[in-house]
Image (cartoon, rainbow, N blue to C red):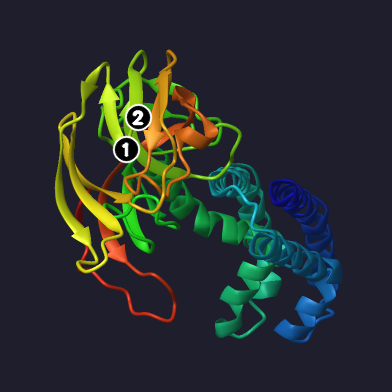
Amino acid sequence: MVNLILLAVASASLIVWLLQEVKGRRQIQTALQWCAEKKTASDAQSLRQQVIPGWLEWSFRIVAGLWFVWIASVVMIKDGDFALALVVLTLLAGLIAGLDKFVFERGRRAFVSAGNVAVYITYFVKQEQDSLKQELGGTLPIAENARSFFPVLLVVLLLRSFIVEPFQIPSASMVPSLEIGDYILVNKHKYGLRLPVIGTKFIEVDEPKRGDVMVFFPPGDKRYFIKRVIGLPGDTLRYSNKKLYINGELVPHTLEAEVPPLRPVTQVIREQLGNSEHLIHHDRRIYRGDFEVTVAPGHYFMMGDNRDNSSDSRVWGQVPEENIVGKAFAIWMHWRSFSELPSFDRVGLIR
């Protein structure tokens, strides 16, 4: 729903701006020529009122209101795709900025600087000339904003799509490696470069390894998840009595502690999974059951480090390769809620 609203608002913005630039600009030029010939305006304010159509300002206000509606829908419905929004905003700003710069700007400049229009503007005091030229022959507000924001949006889009993207940890499924409120960085090119939104890989780089902490979309879900890669394509996994076996071999692990000391509930275990040595949690009060599975070609089996309190491949199945987002590699801040101050005590690489 939010995405459809975004596309509708973006399309409306483009259409309104084109109407302003083509029809509205022509009305301004016709009125300005008439005022220049008749010299009907006595000051800058009077000239503005005579030559600038009222619908230009109102149409801009309507467009601003539409964008406010979209922002409100994102907040209330909470179903927006940020990647799609960034792509749509970048394309919209780029299209309007490009057309304004390379198609319409030359005609505006030629008109304002030519003949009796330029002579008429010189009747006004010096401090008003620049603002008049900007209003009567300059960039309209929609295009002005597009030209201002396009470079910023483009840089953010390229960084977020192909270099690194920030995420926040929303659940405790990766405790103790990642806690609720951790802000992490995800390497977007580690597993290959993918087109934003559609996710098609166009450059091969590397493949996920056992033990990698990976961000992805679970099957049938549009939300980002973060778990640890347990099984690679072709692996046979067995989970028995909370012990993990990969291709018939027990994954090395050692008991580090049981907490709290007097009535232990959680076992803190050090696990060696591939080249990754990390801590995991087992809850002595919970038994999730045993399983044995072979990982399908082009798929990955994911599990949380908080093994007994994690919704992972045991619940929603194996993750197809095309659903991969990137590799989580660092914590850069911890901020659990707005009622607390941000903390940088957990800054560091993710094991």
Quadrant location of the C terminus in the rendered image: top left
Query: Which residue is located at x 41 percent, y 18 percent?
Result: 295
Instruction: Give the structural element (helix, strand or loop) at label 2.
Output: strand
The residue labelled by disc 2 is 239
Against 11, residue 33 (above or below) is below
Tell me if label 2 and label 1 are in contact, CB under 8 Å: yes
In the rendered structure, which amino acid carries the disc numbered 1?
A: Lys
Residue 6 relative to residue 185: left or right: right
**Is residue 140 in view?**
no
Residue 84 at x, y percent in the picture: 58, 43
Query: Which residue is located at x 43 percent, y 21 percent?
Result: 299
- Front-most of 323 and 65? 323
**Is residue 290 in view?**
yes
Against 173, residue 137 (above or below) is below
Residue 257 at x, y percent in the picture: 16, 56
- Front-most of 109 and 52? 52
Residue 241 at x, y percent in the picture: 32, 35
- Front-most of 99 and 89? 89
Callout count: 2
Residue 213 relative to residue 37: left or right: left
The residue labelled by disc 1 is 242
Query: Which residue is located at x 38 percent, y 61 percent?
Result: 180
Instruction: Give the structural element (helix, strand or loop) at label 1.
Output: loop
Against 10, residue 194 (above or below) is above
Residue 42 at x, y percent in the picture: 78, 86
- Front-most of 118 and 208? 208
Residue 195 relative to residue 129: left or right: left
CA neighbours of label 1 inside 10 A, class few (<14), some (14 to 19), many (20+): some
Q: Quadrant of residue 207?
A: top left
In the rendered structure, which amino acid carries the disc numbered 2?
A: Tyr
